[in-house]
Amino acid sequence: MNALEHQLQYPFDETMPAPGTRQEVAPGVYWLRMPLPFALDHINLWLVRDRLDGPGGRDGWTVIDCGIANDTIKAHWETVFADALDGLPVLRVLVTHCHPDHVGLAHWLCKHWDVRLWMSLGDYMSARVLAGGSGVGSNAGGDFAASHFARHGLVDPDHLEKLRARKAYYPSMVPDLPTQYRRLMDGDMVSIGTDPATSGWRVITGFGHAPEHVALYNAATNVLISGDMVLPRISTNVSVFDMEPEANPLQLYLDSLGKYEHLPEDVLILPSHGRPFRNLHTRIRQLREHHVDRLAETLAACVEKPCNAHDIVGVIFRRQFDIHQLTFAMGEALAHLHALWHRGQLVRECGDDGVVRFRVPA
């Protein structure tokens, strides 16, 4: 545990649920943990005991986030169906955002249980575009990503060839999306639970990490399902994507953190990665300070000389990456450069070599 983590409170011991099993973390709310084939090797998913009222109303479960689409994760879900649902059905699938570890198996789960997908418009439509296989909008790979990153200083031929070869990377983990869904919007109250007194969950949308990320807050139980917006151990990735090449996602993310500041400090935070924790305001302060430091390092590097995003990767990360991690690092380095550019602290120029560099104004 690092020094920053010591400032947070972890209410559960270090034992985490094995894939296919559940652990109760709040009344009627259960923690699932599924593996991922990346350096970030897991995702937390959530089961909430539920009841749908009205005609055809029945008891069951709401699933929040899905895992990537592969046979291993499907097998873990089949174990959950057999052993962790108390013989009750899944009633709906709710997805926080469009990234593969969250939405990958949404189509399979919805089809298996004949239920509706609930999602924001921004992330549902983004997932549909990305699953289409054109490669547009995904920094993970393909010709568009390779051109995007080459323009920002990633010129190593081996890296670019690896990127081009990953054109089908997103569709390999999100092969399909339900053709219909139910839209979630900021401020919506969604009833998830069996007791009307404690079943109200308020939608809080956030930006910068994904187009229209959905978090859920239950005031009655003081629980926040934070998705990727507030994580305990790592900072949320914010990246500039090829589809929106002049974007300012870091500022969007920092502004979005303000939407959680009115929640209680002792709210139980259920993140998509890492362990459930408390001390929300402390963590928000840590995240803000982290980006203040990274912005200062980025600006100092550009004072020394004009820098491209690949230059800044070495400044703010100072470690080696595989091609998967490098796409995130490049996107985040560019996000820090763009934040300073949009503030007027840097200017952006394209050189004769076709590479964009940032420098301090004359």
Image (spheres, rainbow, N blue to C red):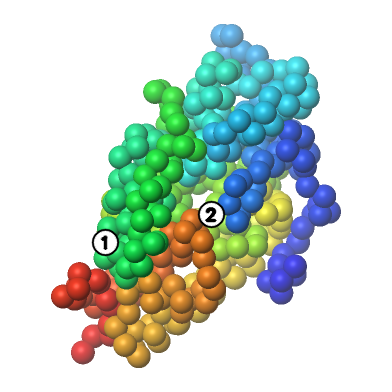
Horizontal placement of 198 versus 319: left or right? right
Q: Is residue 230 left or right of residue 167?
A: right
- Position of the C terminus, as image quadrant, is bottom left
Give how far across and how far down residue 24 sits, in percent.
78, 39
Kind of residue at badge 1: Glu
Answer with the quarter of the image where residue 350 lies.
bottom left
On the question of residue 45 being in view, the answer is yes
Closer to the N terminus: mark 1 or mark 2?
Answer: 2
User: Residue 32 vs residue 154: left or right?
Assistant: right
Would you say 359 lies left or right of 197 here? left
Q: Nearer the viewer, residue 294 or 263?
A: 294
> Which residue lies under the disc numbered 2?
229
The quadrant holding residue 11 is bottom right
Give me the disc on residue 246: 1
Name the kind of residue labelled 2 in the image. Met
Question: Is residue 139 visible to the viewer in this orientation of the structure?
Answer: no
Check the picture and name the quadrant holding the N terminus. bottom right
Residue 305: where, in percent of width, then height? Answer: 31, 88
